[in-house]
Amino acid sequence: MKNIKQLFISFGFQGAAFGAVGIIINLFVVVGLGGNVAMANIALALYTLGNLAGSMVIGTFLDKYPYFFESIFLSLIADAMISLLMAITHSIGIYYILALMLGIFATIMGPAITIFLNKQLDDKGYRKNINKINMINSIGSTIGTFVGGFWLYLPFFSSVDRMRGVFVMGTVLLFISALLIVTYLKRIKSEKNTFQKSPFISTKNVFQSMISPFSFSGMKVESKKYMFSLFLLFFGLNMIFSIFAVYFKEVLNISSSLIFVIYGINSVFGNLAYFLTGKMMERFKDSFLVRMALWVRLSMFVVIIGSYFFLQHGGIMLTVIAFLITGLAWPFIYIPTTVKITNLALPSNRGKVIGMFNMVINLAAICASLISGYIALTFGYILSFIFATVLIFFVERVIYILNKHMEG
């Protein structure tokens, strides 16, 4: 497929934009708009809710109307303008609306490119390139995170102006990504999926795209059980990771600047693992890689829980090391699972299933954030970690049995 490298670079710029902006979506509410921590969490929740809403629509929509160019380009332009508006607004109410809209359009590009590659490449090419494009997006996100973090520490402007500058930075990066899409991404044409019956997208069709992810019609039977298992898996993982930054700050007394560095290194480790994932997928089954990655994370979660009981005797360092190692495992979970989900879908419903997969991830993140936060505040962080670890252990067993059954 021609010009695929430029498509990858475009996705990398999008990752860089959200790597920078993602640092301050909730923080700006406190520093720039005079809100409190609760108000900041609302902004982040609305952004995640937007991700969920976008995931509900895009997959099914692209199955019916394969207008990849328009979808990706318009999402990038929309997010670029929204990011600019977030930089200049002084109203928390307007900022909430913008955060929701940012989340809706932010989630469109990834699934659209995934479906695009699946329709254009054979199985071997798809497996190879889905890893590469996610790796480049992750590298872009890491670079954006470090650049955005560095910008926040510059002494030349006030803290508020520096944060507004990060939103402007995101706008520029998203416009660059959109220009690359304009130049290199071609629309897929399908004889079966055209606008011959109607040149317009009706409200009814959009509504059907919104509710379709909740329907399992047209999907393989295995997809239903597997999708529910993935919801529980990502719910368990987010039970830990959604509160870990606060755990670093409140329990381990690690400074905010050092927390930023730790998360940056965790991301770097994930990028390094992407280089290995593609080669490992050529030698081992997808289910084996996911299983090994989950056991690595389970082991590190046990280390984190155990380290809590001797924090003054090396427990803090062990916790940090264990957290960094979890970053290495992520590509071995996400990439093989994405390929597995694609293969479970019927050809005519792959966009729908990929959209549902992204919806499951975001829905699990929202639910886990609320529940883990309540458990941590009421009973303590460690109980939340223990509950999540036990849940992940049992879900891993269920996924292992499902994979064994599907692979014969």
Image (spheres, rainbow, N blue to C red):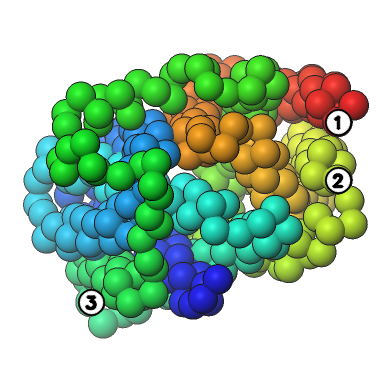
- What secondary structure is found at the residue carrying circle 3? loop
Q: CA distance from mark 3 to mark 1?
A: 58 Å
Nearest the camera: 186 or 21? Answer: 186
**Quadrant (top left/top right/bottom left/bottom right) for the N terminus:** bottom right
Question: With respect to residue 217, does 302 lie above or below?
Answer: below
- What secondary structure is found at the residue carrying circle 2? loop
Q: CA distance from mark 3 to mark 2?
A: 52 Å
Question: Which callout, 3 or 1, points at the residue further toward the start of the chain?
Answer: 3
The percent position of residue 200, horizontal first and vertical second, equals: 15, 40
Residue located beneath label 2 in the image: 285
Residue located beneath label 1 in the image: 407
For the residues bearing labels 1 and 2, Cβ distance under 8 angstroms: yes
The percent position of residue 325, horizontal first and vertical second, equals: 76, 54
What kind of residue is marked 1?
Answer: Glu
Question: Which callout, 1 or 2, points at the residue further toward the start of the chain?
Answer: 2
Q: Can residue 152 be seen here?
A: no
What kind of residue is marked 3?
Answer: Phe
Q: Of circles 1 and 2, which is in front?
A: 1
What kind of residue is marked 2?
Answer: Lys
Please name the residue shown 50% across and 17% down the image.
217
Is residue 34 shown left or right of residue 307?
Answer: left
Please name the residue shown 11% across and 60% down the image.
88
Q: Of circles 3 and 2, which is in front?
A: 2
Is residue 354 shown left or right of residue 123?
Answer: left
Q: CA distance from mark 1 to mark 2?
A: 10 Å
**Dot label at residue 157:** 3
